[in-house]
Amino acid sequence: MSVKLAKTAGFCMGVKRAVDIVLEIAQHKGKEDIYTFGPLIHNPQTIELLKKRGIIPIEDLKDLEMLKEGNTIILRTHGVSPEERTEISKRGVKVIDATCPKVAHVQAIVKKHASAGYTILIIGDREHPEVNALMGHASGKGIVINHKDDVTRLSELDKVCVVAQTTQSMDTFARIVQDIESRYPHALVFNTICDSTEKRQTEIKAMASHADAMVVIGGKNSANTKQLARLSELQGTPTFHIETAEELENIHLDSFIKIGISAGASTPNWIIEEVVDRIARDKVERKKMMEAPLKIWLFTVRNDIYLSIGAGCLSFAGMLLQGLPVNIAVMFISSLYVYAMHTLNRSINIKRTGLIGSCRHNLYRKYEKLYIAAGMLAMFIALGCSFMVGPASFGLLLVLSLAGGFYNAKFLPQRFYYKSLKDIPGSKNVSMALAWATIAAILPQTIESPSVGTATMVAFLFSFSTVFICSSMFDILNIQKDRLIGKETIPVLIGEKNTRPVLKITSLFLLIILVLSYPLGWTPSLNFALLTCIFYMWICFRFCDRHSTLSGPVLGGLLETSYIIVGASAFIWLMFTKNTA
C-alpha cells in the first residue's frame, strides 16, 4: 500500500488568517471570554479547542443578548451581512473582522453592482453563511443559483451580474455560467472562486484518477470539503469523507493499494497527521515479518523509549567530551530521568488540552494510569541509582526532578499574566534543553569533581544546542496545534519563518565550537566525529514540512535519531582511538 498526501491539504490563507487573529487575541485576553459570530471556521474539532481557550461561538442574532458592553466579538471567515454587522455594533462591543479577504472581495463586487441596478446571481449553496452574507450585500437584488434548472426559472432581467461562492465547484460554476450567458448575453461574470479552492479541486481530480481510494478529511458541514469528496467520487474512485482518524476504524482500506489523502480548507494539520499516521500504521501492521524492525522502532518512538535511549547516548558523548570514564549508571539515570519527565509532563498536558496532542497522545489517553505509573517508577529508580552513585549526583537529580514538576505548577498570584513557568513564551524548548544538558554534561562531572572546566562547558553547549534544535524542529511540525492549545514553544513565540534561521544559526555556532575546541585543547578529537550529528540535523531541516507524506511518529523518530547518531559517533570514535592507541 502506498499513501500520498495532497500538497493543498489543510488550512487555506483565509482560515489561517482568522485562526491567527483569534489566537493572538486569546494570548492576551486574560480571563475574559471572546465571542465569534457563528463558528469561526467549519471544523468542529478546532471550534471545541477554541472553546477551551474561552472563544465562544454565537449562533445567531438572538444570542447577542449574552454580550456585555466592551466584550469582543470576531466576525467569522464567511463574513456577515450589513444588517448583522449593524445589529452587532449596536451592542457596544468591540468588533474584529476575520472575514476572509477573498470573501470580502466578492462582497465588494456584489455591493457595487447592486447599487448600480444589477440583479446579482450568486452561484452557491443558499444555506451557506457566506451566501447569506452576500445576499445581504445585494440589498434585495440577489438570487441564489444552485443548479442549471434555477436559470430556466429566472424572469427577464435587464442588467445581470454573476458571482460565485468562493468554495463553489469550478465545473458547476462553468456549466451554470454557460446557461446564464446564453440567456443573458450581456451579463457581467466574475469568477470569484478562491484560487485555493481551484488548486484543491484540480489536485484531487488528478489524484483520484490515479488512486485506488481517496480519503477526504474535513468537517461534515464544510462546503469545500464536501465538494472535494464529490469531485473524487465523480472520477469513479471509492471516496471516504471523514472528520477524524477514529472514523477509519469502520472503513476497510485493506484491498486498496494506492490511497490518496486530501483535506478541506478548514482541516487542521494535526487531524491530517493522525489520519496519515493511522493509515501508515495499518500498512506496516499488515506487512510480513521483514517489517518487524520498523514496527519495533515505531513502538519505541510512540512510547518515548527511543527518546530516553537518545538521552543515554547524549550522556555517553558528554562523558567522552570531558575525558571522563564511561559510567553506565549515569547513562541509565539520564535515560530514566528523561523518560519520566516526558511521560509525566505529556500525561499532564493531555489532561489539560483534552482533545489533541502529538503523534503519541492517543496511546497516552488510552493508557493514562499505566503511563503515569511507569513515569513515577522511572523517576524513583533514577533517584535511587543517583543516590548510590553519590550525594552530589542525587542532589542534582532531585533538584532537576523538582524543577520538572515545578514547571507546570501555577504558583504565581492571579494578578500576574504568567501563572507558571510553562506559560512563559519559549520556555518549553529552553527548559527542556537546559535539563538535558545538565543531565548529559553536569551530572557525570559531579561524580569526578565539583569544578566545571572548559570541556564541561563544551559538552553542556553541545547537548543544549542539539536538544534545542531537535525539539524546536519537532515543534515547527506542531505549531498549528500548539498555538490552538496555548503551548508556548519557540516557533509559537517567533513564528515558523523566524525559527528556521535561528536553528540554522544555532547549528552553525555549534559547528564552530566543535571545530575549534580540539585545536584549542579544550576537548578530545571526538568533536570531529560529532559533526555527523550537525550534518544529519541539516538534513532534518528538510523534513520539517507539514505536508510531508511521512507520518508524525516517523518524523518525530527521525528527529530523535539525532541523539542516537551522537551516541553512535561517540562509540565509533572510542573504538577507533582504542585500536590506534
Image (cartoon, rainbow, N blue to C red):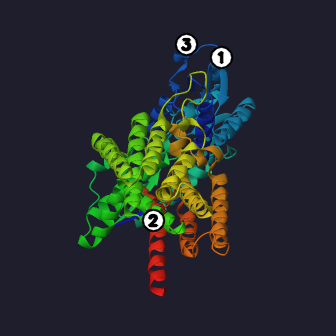
Q: In the rendered structure, which disc, 2 or 3, sits on the residue that comes first in sequence?
A: 3
Is residue 442 positioned above or below 325 on the image?
Answer: above
The residue that mark 3 highlights is 65
Residue projecting furthest to the left? 289
Residue at disc 3, secondary structure: helix
What x and y, as percent, mark residue 428? 54, 45
Three-letter amino acid code of the residue under disc 1: Gly
Q: In the rendered structure, which disc, 2 or 1, sits on the residue that comes first in sequence?
A: 1
Three-letter amino acid code of the residue under disc 2: Phe
Q: Which one is in front in this view, the residue at disc 2 or the one at disc 3?
A: 2
Q: Bin the neighbour count of mark 1 within 10 Å (Cα to Cα): few under 14, some 14-19, many 20 and up.
A: few
Three-letter amino acid code of the residue under disc 3: Glu
Q: In the rendered structure, which disc, 3 or 1, sits on the residue that comes first in sequence?
A: 3
Q: Bin the neighbour count of mark 2 within 10 Å (Cα to Cα): few under 14, some 14-19, many 20 and up.
A: many
Quadrant where the N terminus lies?
bottom left
Whole-Å distance between the Cαs marked 2 and 1?
58 Å
The residue that mark 1 highlights is 70
Q: Is residue 455 visible?
A: yes
Whole-Å distance between the Cαs marked 3 and 1?
13 Å
Q: Which one is in front in this view, the residue at disc 2 or the one at disc 1?
A: 2
Residue at the spot 65% in from the left edge and 18% down from the top edge: 93
